Image: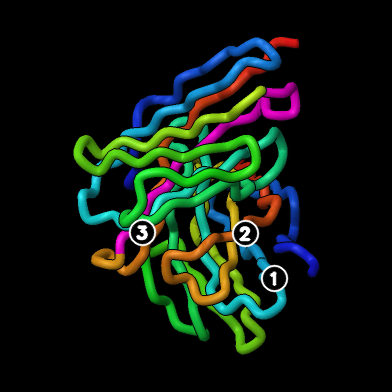
């Protein structure tokens, strides 16, 4: 099976812009989770989607949003970018998301200037 | 954001020695624990998991120990190899928090040839 794919792999934006990142889960996986990884804060949970519904949400401002499509592909959007949003954004998928192994993609490296 | 575990420590071991990586978790209701390995430029990779009804679980060259009394998790790597050099994360989730996965800050393992 193909693994989790994320596009784009690298992105440079300026403050105030918005960005959309995409994640394609492993075929058959219905749960998709997003994480932000920074050197200072480590891996932090953003949100989880299952069957097109947001089921869990981390402690991030409303500028961070996401959605999931009927084919389980997911996108996350960050509006009004801030310098502190520079990070590696990781997507992970699992079959049902309930205390199961998550498989991570390679991440999207976002740099905000 | 939320996090579990100590500040990012580093561990250096000689090739062939055993490695022990420790992690303290915060939520006594957590019932599922996972260890991930992250190599530079890649997303985290699942190593081994354990549920709260177990104290020990073994995989290929890896063993996870869970001490619920002191909320402590450890990963033991036998006969450490240069390819084991990476950052290792412990993660926890709990059904009472809708299985939101919380990651520790990570431990950097460096294997000396």
Q: Chain of mark 3?
A: A
Rounded to the nearest whole Å, what is the CA distance between mark 3 and mark 2?
Answer: 19 Å
Q: Which mark is residue A58?
A: 3
Mark 3 crowdedness (10 Å alpha carbons): few <14, some 14-19, many ≥20: some
Which quadrant is home to the C terminus of chain A?
A: top right
Given this view, does label 3 or label 2 mark the residue nearer the observer?
A: 2
Q: Quadrant of residue A19?
A: bottom right
Residue A65 in percent (x, y) is at 47, 68
- Disc 2: which residue: A103
User: Do marks 2 and 1 both belong to one polypeptide chain?
Assistant: yes
- Disc 1: which residue: A26
Determine whether the residue tagged by mark 1 lies in a helix, strand or loop: loop
Mark 1 crowdedness (10 Å alpha carbons): few <14, some 14-19, many ≥20: many
Mark 2 crowdedness (10 Å alpha carbons): few <14, some 14-19, many ≥20: many
**Viewed as shown, does residue A5 lie left or right of A15?**
right
Start-end of magenta stretch: B80-94
Rounded to the nearest whole Å, what is the CA distance between mark 2 and mark 1?
Answer: 8 Å
């Amino acid at each position: 099976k193909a693994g989790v794919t994320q596009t784009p792999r690298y992105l440079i934006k300026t403050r105030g812009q918005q960005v959309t990142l995409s994640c394609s889960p492993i075929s058959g996986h219905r749960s998709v989770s997003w994480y932000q990884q920074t050197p200072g804060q480590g891996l932090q949970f953003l949100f989880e989607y299952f069957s097109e519904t947001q089921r869990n949400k981390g402690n991030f401002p409303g500028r961070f949003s996401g959605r999931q499509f009927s084919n389980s592909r997911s996108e996350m959007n960050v509006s009004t970018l801030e310098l502190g949003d520079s990070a590696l954004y990781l997507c992970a998928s699992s079959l049902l998301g309930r205390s199961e192994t998550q498989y991570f993609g390679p991440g999207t490296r976002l740099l905000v200037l | 954001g939320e996090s579990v575990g100590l500040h990012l420590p580093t561990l250096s071991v000689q090739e062939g020695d055993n490695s022990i990586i420790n992690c303290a978790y915060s939520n006594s209701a957590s019932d599922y624990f996972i260890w991930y390995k992250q190599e530079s430029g890649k997303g985290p990779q699942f190593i081994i998991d354990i549920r709260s009804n177990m104290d020990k679980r073994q995989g290929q060259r890896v063993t996870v120990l869970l001490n619920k009394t002191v909320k402590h998790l450890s990963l033991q790597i036998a006969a450490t190899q240069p390819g084991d050099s990476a950052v290792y994360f412990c993660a926890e989730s709990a059904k009472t928090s809708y299985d939101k996965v919380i990651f520790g800050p990570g431990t950097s393992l460096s294997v000396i040839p």
